[in-house]
Image (cartoon, grey):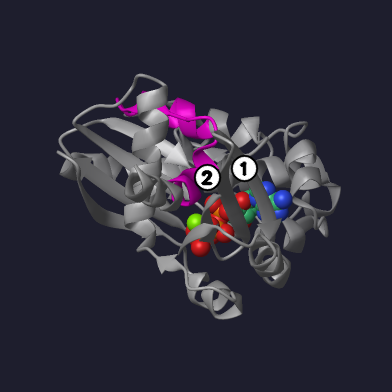
Amino acid sequence: MIVGIDAGGTLIKVAYTEKGKVHFEKYPIAEIERVAGWVNGLGDCQVCVTGGKSGVLVSLLDQPAQEMVEFEATHLGVQVLLKEMDLLEDAYLVTNVGTGTSIHCIQDNVQERLGGTGVGGGTLIGLSHLLTGVTRYDEIVALASQGSRDRIDLKVKHIYEGKEPPISGELTASNFGQDLFSISSDLTKEELLATVIGLVGETVSTVSVQAARQCRSSTIVYIGSSFIDNPLLKEVVKSYTILRGSVPVFPDNGEFSGAMGAMSVLNKKTV
Ligand code: ATP
Ligand code: MG
C-alpha cells in the first residue's frame, strides 16, 4: 500500500492507494495518534508525510517515512487534480485556504510562494465561535448559508449617499462596518456567520487577485478544507475573483492536494 499524509494545523488529510484505487480520509489533528496507529497497523507499506505537523506524525510511526516540503507536495497534488480536469496550464496560482492562507505562483513547473494572509479557515471557525458560540464547522457553515450580510457589512453605496460612487456601489467598503451598536443584540447567528464567511472570502480573494499581478497567469486554483461543503465561501471567492478579472477554479478533492502530492512521489518511485 502507498500512503500520503498531510498533517496540517487543523486537519490530517490521508490519501492512499489500495489495489489500484485511491482513497481519501480526514481526521482532526487531535487524532494524530490514531492516524499513526492506523499506519503502524498496515504492515508492509510506503509512507510519505507532509504538512506542519509531519514531524510529530513521523515521531509516532514505527517505520521510517519519507518527509516532503508542504509547498512542493501541494504543487504536485494540484497538478494531478488539474490534469484530471483537463485544466492544466503552464502557469497558474494556487491559494490554499487552510487554517491560514498561503498563495503560490506556478510557472513552467516551478513553484514560488508569493505570500498569504492569516485570515483563513481558522479565522472562520474562531471568529464564528466568539460571535455566536457555535463550535462545529458543519453547523457554522449551514447556519451561515441562511444568513444575510446586509445589516452588518458597509457597502460603498452606503458611504456615497446621493452621489455616484467611483467604483461599484455593491462592493464591500467595510466588513462588519455598519453602525452595529444599536442593533448588536438583535443580530441573528445566521447573519453574523454569513458575515464572517464574507470577511474570510473577500480577504482571501482580494489578496489572491493582487498576487496574480506577480504571476503570468490569472487563473487562481483555490484549495483547502475551508471550501468543504461551504458553498457560501465558494460563492464569495468566485464572484470577487471574477469581478477582478481573474479565473477561479475549485478542484474536487482540492483539500487532499498535499496528501496526493506526497503519495504521488511514492508512486513515481515504484513505477
Ligand atoms: P494549515 O495548512 O494552515 O496548516 P490545515 O492543513 O489543517 O492547516 P485545512 O485542512 O486545509 O488546513 O483547512 C482547515 C479548515 O477547514 C478549518 O480551519 C475549517 O475552517 C475547515 N474545516 C472543514 N472541515 C472541517 C472539520 N470537519 N473540522 C474542522 N474544520 C474544518
Ligand atoms: Mg494544509
Instruction: Check disc 1 and give the amino acid type.
Output: Phe
| Label 1 SS | strand
Decide if residue 148 is on the left or right side of residue 95. right
Q: Residue at x 69, y 56 (%)?
A: 27
x and y percentages locating residue 182 in the rendered image: 76, 52
Residue 175 shows up from this direction: no
Are the two marked residues, 2 and 1, in contact with CB atoms closer than 8 angstroms? yes
Instruction: Check disc 2 and give the amino acid type.
Output: Phe
Most distant residue in the top direction:
86
Q: Is residue 76 above or below residue 242?
A: below
Magenta part of the chain: 236-260
| Earlier sequence position, callout 2 versus callout 1 | 1
Decide if residue 99 is on the left or right side of residue 71. right
Image mark for residue 256: 2
Quarter of the rendered image showing ligand 1: bottom right
Query: Looking at the image, how many numbered discs can be counted on the residues?
Result: 2
Name the residue carrying label 1. Answer: 24
Q: Is residue 101 above or below residue 239?
A: below
Q: Residue at x 54, y 73 (%)?
A: 63
x and y percentages locating residue 79 in the rendered image: 34, 36
| Label 2 SS | helix
Report which quarter residue 233 is drawn in.
top right
Front residue of 150/144: it is 144
Front residue of 109/95: it is 109
Q: Is residue 120 above or below residue 31?
A: above
- Dot in front, 2 or 1: 1
x and y percentages locating residue 190 in the rendered image: 79, 40
Image mark for residue 139: none
Q: Residue at x 40, y 67 (%)?
A: 67
